[in-house]
Image: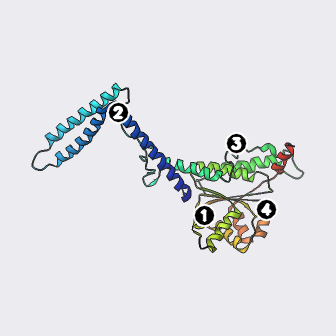
Amino acid sequence: MAYDGKVMSRALQRFEQERQQRQEEYQSRRERIFRRQPRLREIENELRATMSRIISAALRKGNDPRPAVERLRDDNLRLQQEKRSLLRQMGLPEDCLDEKPACPLCNDTGYQDGRVCQCLRTYYAQEQQLELSRMLDLGNQSFDSFNLDWYSDRLAPGQPKSARQHMEERVYETCVNYAHSFGKKMNNLLLFGAPGLGKTHLSAAIAREVSGKGFSVVYDTAGHVFERFEVQKFSREGEEADSDVTRVLNCDLLILDDLGTEMTTAFVQSALYQIVNTRLMERKSTIISTNLTPEKLSQRYSPQLASRIEGEYQLLPFVGEDIRKLKRELNR
């Protein structure tokens, strides 16, 4: 699983802030208890001192340390018993002065056996949702809110399925299965069709589901992505662009939206081929959304690129009437 450096940096920052907040709350709780019963502070200090004396006694030369260690052990047990008794008298749990990690798997380090722990992955997923929400309406654009009623159930002449049946059985179900099974294998989608048919909605639903699992997802318009590639190549101040290009090429899922609306140049054609080819070679999943048909893509970019896409991507044609237009007419 790849992690977006920018998103992980924010996740780590919030992870550390909340860990520090828990530490401060723990210390504050201890101080409140010590103020109620000062003897508990004395016991805590004596217990720490007892441990040091046990170690010193064990290392002392020339004498058998066992009698001293046993006496110190007895003192330790007596102090612990007194501590438990005082806490019970105060109506508090016996372990209320002990510091407990929020995550027992990694002891609040964020890493377990050299890998990112589940607790930190949760922070990462939350930060990634915020990142995606800057461009997508993740709150409303979900699989549950995708309304198939906007597609006609009338069977057009010469067509085996209505627009609604096609969108439900071929498009919607494919997108749902894609999101639910993400990570089990590399898979790519080409979403194409006229504007207003739900491409952005289903792209957002996939992004929401996949990012919620902790995978790194980059959603961006083709025009902006190509602009970042251009800055990286030609600008002397391209450090941030370097990071943006790395994110595009290395993320677990790239959703490239509105392909074909940008000004097509030789550089854009080269950048698009680099994205498609690099991600295929690295076994990274990609979704491309466009208003162009595969034939138009071949004409606008190159037959070589179109061949790569048609051979390696599942093609999902969106059909029907412009939903935005239907909604406007309904609200008049």
Q: Residues within 10 Å of mark 3 (few under 14, many from 20)?
A: few
Task: Judge from the rendering whether residue 10 lies leftward or rightward of residue 25; answer left or right.
Answer: right
Tell me how far mark 4 sits from mark 2, CA to CA: 74 Å
Residue under circle 2? Answer: 35
Tell me how far mark 3 sits from mark 4, CA to CA: 28 Å
Q: Who comes first in sequence, dot 3 or dot 4?
A: 3
Q: In front: mark 1 or mark 2?
A: 2
Tell me how far mark 3 sits from mark 1, CA to CA: 32 Å
**Kind of residue at badge 1:** Asp
Residue under circle 1? Answer: 244
Tell me how far mark 1 sits from mark 2, CA to CA: 53 Å
Find numbered disc 1 in the image and state the secondary structure of the residue it sits on. helix
Q: Position of residue 87 (x, y in %)?
A: 34, 29
> Residue at coordinates 10% horizontally, 46% vertically from top-left?
63
Residue under circle 3? Answer: 144
Find numbered disc 2 in the image and state the secondary structure of the residue it sits on. helix
Residue under circle 4? Answer: 293
